[in-house]
Image (cartoon, helix red, strand yellow):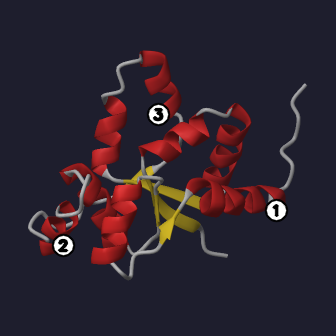
Amino acid sequence: MPALRCVIDSMVFDAIAGKPALLRDVDRLTRARRVELLAALETMAELAATPDEEHRRRLQKVRVLVVAPPPPRDPRLRALRAGAGVSEEDARIALTAATHEVPLVTEDRDLRLAAAAQLPALVLWRWETDLRPRIEDLVAELPVPPRWR
């Protein structure tokens, strides 16, 4: 069975890192190659700039694969940036997902609207209604890890 692959934004890092049991489950799934959480360079830079060191360390525990960015002169960047409230970084994150042909998981309303308009083939997911239930289903399929004494 192929791995569940998607690009996640910083809000999803927060959602996963904020729940220790969920973080352990995601780690098990990524180690088992059942899930591949992908991250854009812009997302990793945003996480690295988190001022609270303890919070930053928790976010960095979410296991991701950092993927290649989209071409720098991709004309879709300008079209995405034209959307209200869409930063250069947000546009690059959406375009990264589109370039790698995987869903983008974000709660950013402005980015979702711009991506839906400018990248119609891009699948848009939300954390609570799309990715989290898929993760929970995959966790249920994993064998229970042995308990160490």
Q: Is residue 33 visible?
A: no
Amino acid at dot 2: Arg
Q: Earlier in the sequence, mark 1 or mark 3?
A: 3
State how far apart marks 3 and 2 are (Cα). Answer: 30 Å
The quarter holding residue 110 reads: bottom left
Is the C-beta separation of discs 1 and 2 under 8 Å? no
Residue assigned mark 3? 60
Residue assigned mark 2? 76
Q: Is residue 128 visible?
A: yes
Q: Residue at (58%, 35%) from the top-left corner?
A: 17
Classify mark 2: helix, strand or loop: helix
Residue assigned mark 1? 141
**Image location of residue 13, percent across then percent down:** 50, 42
**Image location of residue 53, percent across then percent down:** 42, 17
Q: Residue at (28%, 60%) from the top-left corner?
A: 68
Callout 2 environment at 10 Å: few (<14), some (14 to 19), or many (20+)? some
